[in-house]
Structure formats: structure tokens, C-alpha cells
Amino acid sequence: MIKRRDWAKYFFLSIAGLFTFNNKAFIAPAYATDKRHNQARLLTQRGKKFFDEGRAVEALQDWKEATKIYRQIHYQEGVTGSLINQNYALQALGLNRRACTTLLQALKLDTDADICAIPSEQSTESTTELLTKAIDQQKPTPLNLLAWHNLADVLRSIGKLDESKIVLAKILSTAKNLSSADHSRILLSLGNTENSFYKQAKDNYSSIEEPGFKKEASFLVQKKALESLDIYQQINNSSTTSQEVQLQSQLQHLNLLLDFQEWLTIEVRLGKTNLATVRASINQQIQPAVDLVLKNSSTFSQLPASQSVYAKLNFANSLNQISDQQLHSVAIGYAKSALRTAQSTNNHRLKSESFGTLGKLNPKQSQTYFEQALSQAQSVRASDIAYQWQQELGKLYQKQKRTKAALQAYGAAIENITQVRKNLLPNNADLQFSFQEKVEPIYREYMRLLLASPNPDLKRVIQTNERLQIAQLENFLQCGNLDIIPLNEVKNLPSAPTVVHIIDLDESVEVILQLANGSLHSHSVDSKLVKTNVDNLLEILQSLRLSSTAEIDILSFPRSLYDLLIAPIKTYLPSSGTLVFTLDTSFQSLPIGLLHDGNDYLFKYCSIAQTLGSRVRQPKLLLKDQLRALIGGLSEINPSLRTLNVLENMKALPKVKEEIEYVKQQTSSSKVLLNEKFTSQALGQQLSSFNSPIVHLTTHAQFSSEAKRTMFFTWDKAINALEFYSLLKFSARSNEDGIELLVLSACQTAKGNKRSALGIAGVAAQAGARSTVATLWKVDADSTALLMEQFYKNLKNGVPKAEALRQAQLNLISDSRYSHPYFWAGFILVGGWL
């Protein structure tokens, strides 16, 4: 089983990634006469044979036995080589973090140093420093270079692209001075890492909503594509590079050209005419790239069987993207050749991939091919490829008006995607690439089909939307499974909550009301009507002129949204209590409490909480003896405000000291970090040592649709969403109950961002925070201090968090100085409402 970057096409098909080293397993020299030594050599050779046949499990077992023998006879070179071999098998099985740890053993590095941690669990700066130092200290033998080369590839596969690039650059420089080293293979890996940077940048670009950040992201996509293409071109032009490495490079080069051309074409169609010249240049390179592969076609048969199959399928899919009937016929020929090779090995995964590719290439026979592909995948429980064929079959059944069969196919595809993400996401960062483009549509199409039936299964719609929202959040946070549970699994509540699900299905917005007694009610509304009002309202709310905009000029949009979303279900709503909203990404920057029925705001009738994909940590009332707070704040201009990518007009925050004093007065004990004492290091130390159920930060914060631009500011640096997780996880470890309440005061949403909840509460939930209170825009200092004082007084009196916030907002609105929505509407609670 071999892994590929574009997982929506070939989940495990990376010709140049995993097999950068020609797939030549380390085999110890035959000079030794010791029986044990020879036994290890035979195991290594048999493991290689298994591996070439796509039998990674058997290969791993043999290579483990060989490692054990080499250790017993104290043959260190054999140990190192066998560990490198184990890494190949582990990568083929999708166990990239285990492969990474195995390579650390081969290099005699500390396996507890978090080098192999997923990106959100370790800082890039500390990891790169550790790796650079280790490379400099080790003797540059060919075997060590091989291990470092493998480690760089594995680091790339788990999303540590900066670390991968640094290692490759270091060993490439060393390899050029060693006659025995094949530096072209290292250069190929460097091209693949730049290619991954490109895919990551392209994926980020598709999800960025803020116009100001979009332009910069577009430039990065182009830069990384061109850098990767340049490296592949260097390899292709080299007369000393082996035919096999050239084929790998040529395939990657062609694939990237086609992918980049597609992106450029879409951008030009959207009005980015400045990219037309770049597109023309890329387009001119495609046919010569095809010709190069065809010229080197004899090399396909020289590869081991599994590599040969994937290489042919890779080429066939590339050719299929070109509008040329002759090349389409060539593509079918390569796919059929791949199938014949796969059948000769009796490898079910290879056969599944081959049948599936033929299904894409032969529309008239596609159903038969896809059904055969699915059967092969299911025979070995290969969820990672089965879901692709189930999606394709779902599309076909839809066209044939076979709704029941289409529902079954889409439902099964989502079950498989869920299983794949659960088992492999923490090991493989590539699973996140192209999620929005390739995988999200499966969820949404399934929900459309469910809702189109005469008696729609609303519970299944809610469950599917929940899975989609969580998958989006995991992608945003670059993390594995979040420790949060569905609302219907929440236990020991005084009463079940009333939940409102608002789901964006492109042409329609679906509203599903889930009452405490379990009954469900729904209605559908034209999405254009909803989104026009949302866009107009957010334009006002995210404007610097919000405070000076007359309330009457704001109200028309909240009233329209109430009529569209809430009015049709009003008769079913309770007259008081808590409303829990699950908002699709298009609506997460919307302050729901601001919706207006013509008489009053929605928050006047009930307390409001938002959840992440219908999920929360188990809600729990904050007890009086838990009112211990770690408080951090900035009231002065500080160095971190010079950080790149921050919002404009960030100045020193007034009234910070007053707000901190109010919080101190209402809590039983507190630890305060103010100004120069509020450093990133001090915050981390206090989070790990001070048992504080409440963390209250009065500092500038920026929320963006991109994790690295979602940040808050300490004295010395801006801490982005992924770094924040690293800090919070220490608190979760030291405090058995984790953080009960995280309060972020003085937040601001980047203009154009529609999904603030991801940035505001996602990291906190991931790290164990039960509830988060934050603002959607930078509010007035005086009114915020008063609101926080009242909020904590309410908590001290035993009022649940959502209701405590509502009462604090009511207190503000009753004051004529602060009745304007600017002062109170931006405060939201995400997570547990008790």
C-alpha cells in the first residue's frame, strides 16, 4: 500500500514521496558467516519481496525479526538499516507517526522529544533547532543520510513541512560532498516538500474569507507551485539522474502542472486577469511534460509491481485531465495495463484502485468498474479507498433516479470517511488537503438527498451535519479527534436543551429545531435571502463605524433574519430557558442574540449558546469553590503588536486594570499577569502550575478563517491558535477537570470572516475548556468592564454561564449609555451553557 498526496484521488499513492529511495530495502552485506546474520539477511530479503508485492504487514513482521536478530548479534549497521525498512512498511500502512519514531531510533535520537508530534502539539522553532543540531553532530555516512532522508519524508507526511525542508536542505548539502550519495533523490524529496507546501497553501486559500488575507495567500500558492516545478525541472534536465528517479519526477511534475493550471483557470474566470500570463506559460509546459513521460515509458515495467501499478494510474489520471481524445485512449491503455499487473499480484488494494480509475475513464462502463473497485476494497476493509467508489456510485444512482441506492452509497461513504479520519488523521496531514473541495460535498449531497424524501430522516441530517462540522474543525486545528460529545449523549442535565441547527446546503438553508422532548421540526428557506442579509449585517458589524451607525439602520437585517430563520419555528420554542445553536460555517460570526422579532431582541427571551458541530464537553455548573482565575492582560503598547498579519488600528487597551480588578473581586482567588509580566512563557508556566478553572485574558485577539492568523497577544509575542493549544494542554494535564471557563476580552474578527467560532472556541475545546466567552468585535472598554463585573457576580451567585452572560448583557442594555448593539451584542458563549 503506497501513499499519495491527493487523497481524494489515490489515498495512498505517492510515487515520489514514500519511495524516494528506490524502495531498496537495506540488506546487510554477505561477508559474514554467522548463521544469525544470514538469517537476518534472508528475513530482510523476504520482507522486501513482500513489500514489493504490496504486503506491508508481512514485510513489517520480517523486518522486525531482522532488527531483533541484528540487536542480539550487536550489528549496529543492520539494526539501523532494518529500522529504516520498518519505516517503509509503517508508512505504507498509514502509520506515519510510528514510522517517524522508528526513524528516531535508527538515528539514536530521543523518541520522547516530540519531534514526531503533530504540528499543533509542538512548536516548529524548537523542533527545527533540535533537528539541525542533531544532523551537525552525526557522522555523515550513507546509511545515516538514508535515515535522515526518510525522516524528512515522514515529517512531510505528518504536516511538518518546515522541518522536512530544513532536514532535506541540510543533507542535500552534505550529499553533494559524498560520492556514494544519490543527491538527485534528496532533491526529488525537496521538490515533493515544496509541492506539499503548494497543496497546503492552495487548501488554505480556498478557506480564507478575508479579502485582505486572500491576496497574500494567492501569492503563496503561486510561489510554492513555481518553486516545486523548478526543482522537478532540474531533475528532469539532469543527465546523471537515473531513469526511475526521472520518471518519478516527471510524473510529479506533470501532475503539479495540471493541478496548478486548473487553479489558475478558476482564478482567471473569477476576474484575476493578472494570472492569465502565468496560466498561459503553465499551459505551454503540459504537452512537453506528457512527451517526457511517454519517452521514459519503458521504466514503468522496471518498477516493482505495486509501484508500477500506482505510477501507471497516476499517469492515466493526469492524461484524463487533458482534453485530447488520443491521450484519453492512452490513459485507458495505462489503466488497463495497471489492472493486469495488479491482478498478477492478487493485491486487492491495487485491483481496487485500477478498477476505480477505469471507472472514471470509461463512463459507459463506470458502474460496473466502480462496483468491482468497491468489492475489492471491501474485501480487505480498505475504508480509505472504498468511500471514493461509494461516492462515485452515489452520483451514478442519483442520475438514474435510484434515490434509495444513492442514499445507501453516500451514507456508507460517510461512515468510511469517519472511520478513516478517526484512525489516520493524527498520522497523516495529507488527509486535510482538499477537504473543502473533495470531501465536504459528500456530506452536503447526502443531506440534500435525505431532506428531499417525502419523510426526511431529520435525525440522520443532524448527525451528518454534526460530523461535517467536527471534520471542518479538526481540519482547521490540524488535530485528531476532539474530546467532545454529541448533545444527545450529554448526561445529568437539569433539563435537556432546545437546539436549533442552521445548515447551509448552497441553494437552501435548512433550519431544524430539536426540542427537549426529542421532537423535531424543520423548514427550508432560499439561501440567497439568508446570505444577503447575513452579508449586509456582517458588513456593518465588522466595520469600524459600527458604534456610530444608528440602531435603526442595523435592525432591518436582524429582523429579516429572524423572519427567515426563527419565525417559522417560533410556536415550538419555549418561552424561556436556553437555546443552543449549531451554526454552519457561513453563519458562525453572526451574533444570534441580535436577531429581532419586531418587538425585541432574541436574547431578551432566552439565554443563548453556540456549539461546535452539535458537540460540547459535558456541561457542568461552575461551583463557588471553583471561582479561581488566572488573569492576563495588556494595558500598554507592547512588542507583540508589531507582529505581521495583525488587524489595523491596534492600540493600547484602556480600562484593562479596572476589568482585571473587577474579576479579582468576584473570584475567590486569582493570579494576575499584567503587561510585561504577561509573557508567553509566564502564561504557559501558570497554566501548568496554577489550578485555575477560569482563564480570563484581557488582551487584543484576532479571529480569522485561518488558524495561524487566529491569535491573541501577550507582551512578547502573538500566540496563534495552534500555539495556544500547546499552552492549554498543560493546564488540562495539571488540572483534572481542565478549564471550566475561558474568557477572551477585547477580541476582533478579521473583516470578511464568517466563521469566528472555529477560532474562538475550537482550540479551547480541543485543549479541554468546557466553555468560552468572547467578543465578535472590539467593544467599548468601559462597557466591557461593567459587563464582566456583572457576569462574574452572576457566576458567584450560582447562575449558569449562558444565563449569567445574558443577564450581564441585559444590565448593559438597560443603561442608556450602552443600549446600542455595539456595546452588548458582540459577546457570545460557545460550548457548555451551564
Image (spheres, rainbow, N blue to C red):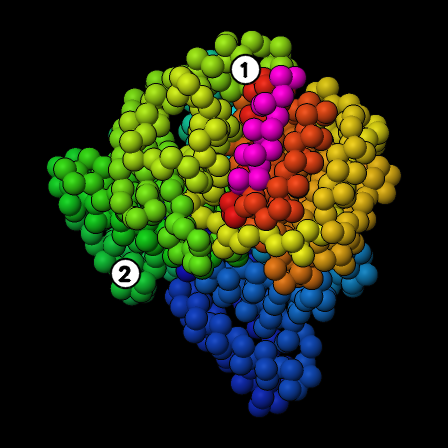
Q: Is residue 812 magenta?
A: yes
The residue sitting at 78% across, 63% down in the picture is 138
Q: Residue 340 location, x and y as percent?
A: 27, 56
Left/right of residue 348 with respect to residue 188 in the rendered view? left
Q: Nearer the viewer, mark 2 or mark 1?
A: 1
Which numbered circle lies on residue 378? 2
Q: Is residue 99 magenta?
A: no
Quarter residue 140 falls in: bottom right
Question: From the viewer's perspective, is residue 300 above or below residue 779?
Answer: below
Q: Secondary structure at mark 2?
A: helix
Amino acid on which the number 1 mark rests in the picture: Ile
Question: From the viewer's perspective, is residue 812 above or below residue 618?
Answer: above
Left/right of residue 115 with respect to residue 577 in the rendered view? right
Please tell me how crowded label 1 is: few (under 14), some (14-19), or many (20+) other residues with Cα within 10 Å: some
Figure quadrant of the N terminus = bottom left
Q: Residue 183 location, x and y as percent?
A: 65, 50
Disc 1 target residue: 540
Please tell me how crowded label 2 is: few (under 14), some (14-19), or many (20+) other residues with Cα within 10 Å: some
Cα distance in 3D space between marks 2 and 1: 52 Å
Of the image marks 2 and 1, the number of the one nearer the N terminus:
2
Instruction: State if disc 1 and disc 2 touch (CB < 8 Å).
Output: no
Q: Nearer the viewer, residue 383 or 758?
A: 758
Q: How many numbered circles does the render carry?
A: 2
Amino acid on which the number 2 mark rests in the picture: Gln
Q: Which residues are magenta?
A: 802-817
